[in-house]
Amino acid sequence: MKIYIVGTGADGSRTLTAEGRSAIEAAEVIIGAKRMIEGYRSCGKVVLEEYRSAEIARFLAESSFSAAAVLMSGDCGFFSGAARLAEALPNHDVEFISGISSPVYLFSKLKMDWSDCNFVSLHGKSGNIARAVRAHRLTFFLLGGDMTAADVCRQLCEYEMSGVTVHIGERLGYHDERITSGTAAELSDIRTAELCVLLADNPDYERSVPSCIPDELFIRGRVPMTKAEVRGVAVAGLDIGREDICWDIGGGTGSVSVEMAVRCERGTVHSVEKSPEAAELIDSNRRKFGCDNIVIHTGRAAELLGELPAPDCVFIGGSGGELSEIVQAAYEKNSNMRLTVTAVSLETLSECIAVFDELGFEADISQIAVTRTNKVGTHTMLSASNPVFIIKRKLI
């Protein structure tokens, strides 16, 4: 059977391409979600209201049509179920026909270039809103489900980006479409239609991935903090990916959590801290640096780790005497997790080596001794910090 998977564009009719229209005309049966097939119910062809890949595949397997058209909103390659459907139809001649996706349509209406845009789907799921906008000049959000345009604007305001320009497109392609522009603060209470997208334009975005962030930029307190140079080496050694799940055990001020979070832009950092005072500092710093992908857990690590998702990367800056239990818990969740521990005393170093040996880990141990300079009168004096051991699990 010839099966056309047709991207129908923004509204499913007016923005349908000529190629898509020809495929629909050639098909004996038209399949799609209710909104996609509404205009074809009286066309004289068999019309099936269905969007689930397995059910579509089952229907086609039990039929004798020579050609079918499955209608998908927007474009087949933009957060579409087209690829999943094609996998369910291995014995058929499947052809994708591209459509005009919602970002292409919105950018054309705004007369803007979208070559370097970042795309995030919030359609029925959550995402890292503030982190995405902080890291990119242009971020397009596909909305739907529980997340509204007003929710996105409020999230940006909460993470100190209230002045970011926002363009909200409602019912794009339809006769009653509406495009509203303003700042996140101005649009934080807007009411919108269910079919809605949002574009955030942040000229003050991060031009590079922040690393070795100066200590003085963090909101401090009486809570100990991993110094910039040590932090930079330790976090870089974890080789954090954009979608990784990270654990920061002994979060302190949140400085390591922040440097992890800017690297796993589409992932999550679980920052575990037993001190309520320190947990408040972590919260303040995640807001300052636009890291809504940091989740704070307050309490003893050994009691909390069982509830956390399996980590790709683990940093332990403070174990509260539970180092063995923490490492064991991380290993049981993911035996291939990347692990780095810092130690400022020989006793902690010795304990860490023993734990690594017990689990059969090969340790890569280095020591960092940072000396900074201070101007005293006409002289530049040296000010040494305590040396720090960095114990990294070596993966073969």
Image (spheres, rainbow, N blue to C red):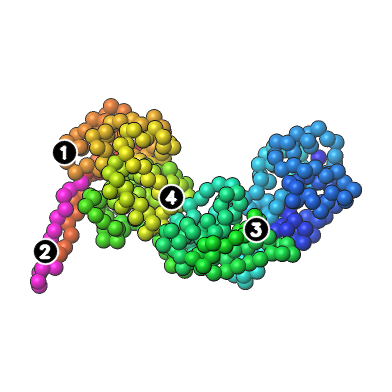
Residue receiving disc 3? 193
Closer mark to the observer between disc 3 and disc 2:
3
Could you tell me how far apart the alpha carbons at marks 1 and 4 are, in whole angstroms? Answer: 34 Å
Residue receiving disc 1? 346
Kindly identify the residue that appears in the image at 19 percent across and 54 percent down: 370
Taking the image as shown, residue 278 lies to the left or right of residue 344, namely right
Work out whether residue 151 or residue 245 is closer to the camera in this orientation and state it: 151
The answer to which image quadrant residue 65 occupies is top right
User: Does the CB distance between marks 4 and 2 fall below 8 Å?
Assistant: no
Q: Residues within 10 Å of mark 2 (few under 14, many from 20)?
A: few
* Disc 2 residue type (three-letter): Met
Residue receiving disc 4? 293
Could you tell me how far apart the alpha carbons at marks 4 and 2 are, in whole angstroms? Answer: 40 Å
* Disc 4 residue type (three-letter): Asn
* Disc 3 residue type (three-letter): Ala
Disc number placed over residue 381 in the picture, else none: 2
